Image (cartoon, grey):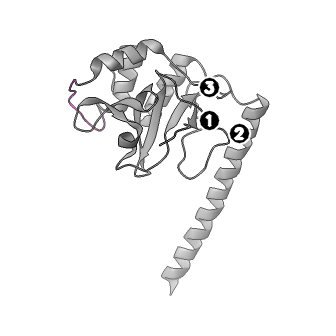
Amino acid sequence: MPLPLLWLGGAAIGAVLLADEREKRHQLELKRRKGIAPKTFKEGEHLPLAPSVWQAGHKKVQPQPGSIICCFVYGLIEHTGIWLDEHTLIELHGSGLVRAVSTKRFLAGRTGSKIFVACSHDHQVLVEPAMLEKAQQAIYTYREYDLFDNNCHRFVWSCLSGKEESLSSFNDLNQRLATYFNQSLYWDEAELDI
């Protein structure tokens, strides 16, 4: 009998935490609308607005060539890439092949229907045109893929910075992006017609 009570208690605690997280996200979105959301990045600071499969944002953005994008892989980890054009992006696949794929292909076998774009506090897409050129030149090349050392985050960072540095997590990439763009980083849902 105690096991079902533990499950109910765990579910209740989970629901309270989720409601609290939704409220924090809602308050941050309101601050963004008013123009008072955090603009500058401070070393060691957490990401103000992370991508979320469960909580929709208040505003969707249109990706631009050279935008940094991400989606979830089974709701557990993030997969990143670089937006190329209207329905195409560049990614480092788990096979090690750098490839240009459609948005449908990018999402296939992953969480499903949402792509997120790295943005500033005022919903402006963060773009670096030189990064797009480097990513295009890498198409059909092969990299020795490793989930923790030579992954999609490292590929995106190398296209942006020109440096080959190990990035073991999405959080590592976010810290470097915020420093590179010298501002807080927000992940807004992309407006897509899939």
Residue under the point 50% across and 44% down: 114
Q: Nearer the viewer, residue 106 or 151?
A: 106
* Position of residue 154 measured from the top left corner of the image (x, y, whole percent): 35, 27
User: Is the magenta region chiefly helix, strand or loop?
Assistant: loop
Left or right of 142 in this view: 123: right
Q: CA distance from mark 2 to mark 3?
A: 12 Å
Q: CA distance from mark 2 to mark 1?
A: 10 Å
Mark 2 falls on what kind of element?
helix
Kindly indicate the quadrant of the structure image that contains residue 162.
Answer: top left
Left or right of 148 in this view: 160: right
Mark carried by residue 29? 2
Left or right of 23 in this view: 128: left
* 10 Å crowding of disc 2: few (<14), some (14-19), many (20+): many
Please report the bounds of the magenta region as a residue range.
141-148
Residue under the point 49% across and 40% down: 115
Q: Nearer the viewer, residue 169 or 26?
A: 26
Q: CA distance from mark 1 to mark 3?
A: 10 Å
* 10 Å crowding of disc 1: few (<14), some (14-19), many (20+): some
Question: Which residue bears the numbered disc 1?
Answer: 48
Question: Which residue bears the numbered disc 3?
Answer: 120
Badge 1 amino acid: Pro
Badge 2 amino acid: Glu
* 10 Å crowding of disc 3: few (<14), some (14-19), many (20+): many
* Position of residue 5 measured from the top left corner of the image (x, y, whole percent): 55, 80
